[in-house]
Structure formats: C-alpha cells, structure tokens
Image: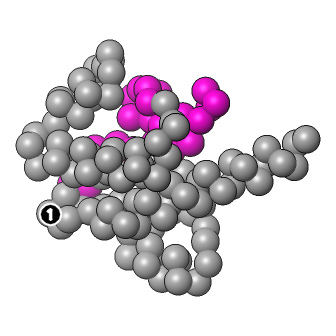
Amino acid sequence: MAPRFASVDDYIDSYPEETRTQLSGVRRAIREAAPHAGEKISYGMATFTVDGKPLIYYAGWKNHVGLYPVPTGGPEFEEAIGPYRRAKDTVRFPISRPVPLELISEITELCLQRRAAAAEQST
C-alpha cells in the first residue's frame, strides 16, 4: 500500500535530496503563477487546487518529476514542451537536469486560463 502523507511538505520530504530539490522548484513555480491556489495530497500526489478542485498535480518518481494534466497550447508552447511530453496530458522532467521552471509557470497559467474559460461557459 502506498504511503499516506499528512501534507505536501511531508510528501516532498519523503524523497531523496535531488528529487526534493526538483519538487520544491516545481512547487515554487506553480505557487508564483497561482498564489491563490490551495495545496493538498490527492491520489497520492502533491496537488494545487482552485475553489477546492484540482488544478494541477505533480509527483516525484525514480527518474523524473511529472505534471498532470498539461493542456495543449500554441505552437511555441508545444515546441518548448515537446521534449517532455509523454502522453496527451502528461509531462516528465528528468531528475538529472534542471526543471525548466518558466515552463512550469506557463503550464500553470494555461491551466488557470482553461479553468476560467470552463467557468465562463458554465454560467
């Protein structure tokens, strides 16, 4: 059974130093792009929420840090994210290289834009 974490801090602290550093950078970049977002553990991953609903998940793995879901964007965004995209809505950043934090900010901003557009359509 997977371990349960009381907080995002506990989740990040459970990883080796190199992974902790990457996860902390990802967390910081998301927090800067979405300062109003909440944090929790959901599905065993660190999760940022807006209005109580998941906005973006991030997780540490043996060889990479993953973000989920990652929306599609314009051509420049897709070119920048291409080397990291592993599935339609998943990206993986290798632990062995610095995570491109500016790209994490762009991903977060896209997620926020998609959430706002969906909210407008439902009203």
Locate residue 75: give its quadrant: bottom right
Query: Residue 46: image x %, image y %?
Result: 38, 34
Kindly identify the residue that appears in the image at 68 percent across and 55 percent down: 114
Q: Which residues are magenta?
A: 39-64
Callout 1 amino acid:
Ser
Colour convention: one colour
Residue 71 visible to an observer of this rendering: yes
Query: Residue 21: image x %, image y %?
Result: 16, 48
Query: Residue 115: image x %, image y %?
Result: 69, 48
Locate residue 83: give its quadrant: bottom left
Q: Main secondary structure of the magenta part?
A: strand
Kindly identify the residue that appears in the image at 40 percent across and 67 percent down: 103
Q: In the rendered view, does 112 fall on the left or right side of 44?
A: right
The relative height of residue 26 versus residue 98 in the rendered view (above or below) is: above
Q: In the rendered view, does 11 fall on the left or right side of 109?
A: left
Q: In the rendered view, does 100 fall on the left or right side of 34?
A: left
- Is 23 within the magenta? no
Q: Quadrant of the C terminus?
A: top right
Q: Which residue is mark 1?
A: 96
Q: Dot 1 lies on which element?
A: loop
